[in-house]
Image (spheres, rainbow, N blue to C red):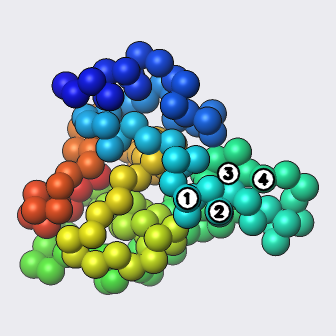
Amino acid sequence: MDQLLQERLQNGDWCTCGYCFPPEHAFSAHDVTCCQESQPAREMCNDYQEFGDHMPYPCVTQHPSFYHQCLHERGLNNRAHLYMMPGVDVRMVDRNERLRYIAFRVYIAWTHGRLGRQNRRAIPHCVQKAIRRRFPDPHGRYTGHQPADLADQQPGA
């Protein structure tokens, strides 16, 4: 286990949104980042006036659009054809695993735009927790962040 991961698992100072700590299902340092460490997510938190609010959102998961973008099952199912991997028979993939996979892809597209096949970003832990709570694995098995070459082999969640 790398040093940064160990430090972050033991100390919550890295989480400034208040929704990441304590980390659950962290496999690498990529899995223990806060949304406030990501400029696009911070910018999302600061567009509060657009929604008639008076203060920035403390966490991107509190943004009014987060639920509709990343947690709304019908919306995710409507976008499934955009994000499923070629050659994967979605009928053979567990419903929640498929929805988690799509939700993670939608989050990245929502905050960073379309990145392309080998261009990957870490998903903040607060976002991982929210998506995994909405679409849990019945056995608590999650893969975490994977390098692009591994992630291209299977849907991950």
Q: Is residue 81 above or below residue 35?
A: below
Quadrant including the N terminus: top left
Labelled disc at residue 56: 4
- Point out the frontmost of discs 4 and 3: 4
Tell me, yes or no, whether the two marked residues, 1 and 2, touch with CB atoms within 8 Å: yes
- Point out the frontmost of discs 1 and 3: 1
The image shows residue 45 at horizontal and vertical percentages of 69, 57
Q: Helix or strand or loop: what does disc 3 sit on? A: helix
Q: Amino acid at mark 4?
A: Pro
Give whichever of discs 4 and 3 has the lower sequence position: 4
Return the residue nearer the eye: 37 or 84: 37
| Residue on which disc 1 sits | 39
- Point out the frontmost of discs 1 and 4: 1
Q: Residue at x 85, y 52 (%)?
A: 55
In-image side of 11 versus 18 (left or right): left
Q: Helix or strand or loop: what does disc 4 sit on? A: loop
**Spatial distance from mark 2 to mark 4, Cα to Cα?**
9 Å
Q: Amino acid at mark 3?
A: Gln
Give whichever of discs 1 and 3 has the lower sequence position: 1
Q: Amino acid at mark 2?
A: Glu
Tell me, yes or no, whether the two marked residues, 4 and 3, touch with CB atoms within 8 Å: no
Q: Quadrant of residue 83?
A: bottom left
Q: Quadrant of residue 155?
A: bottom left
Whether residue 136 is visible here, answered yes or no, is: yes
Q: Residue at x 52, y 23 (%)?
A: 12
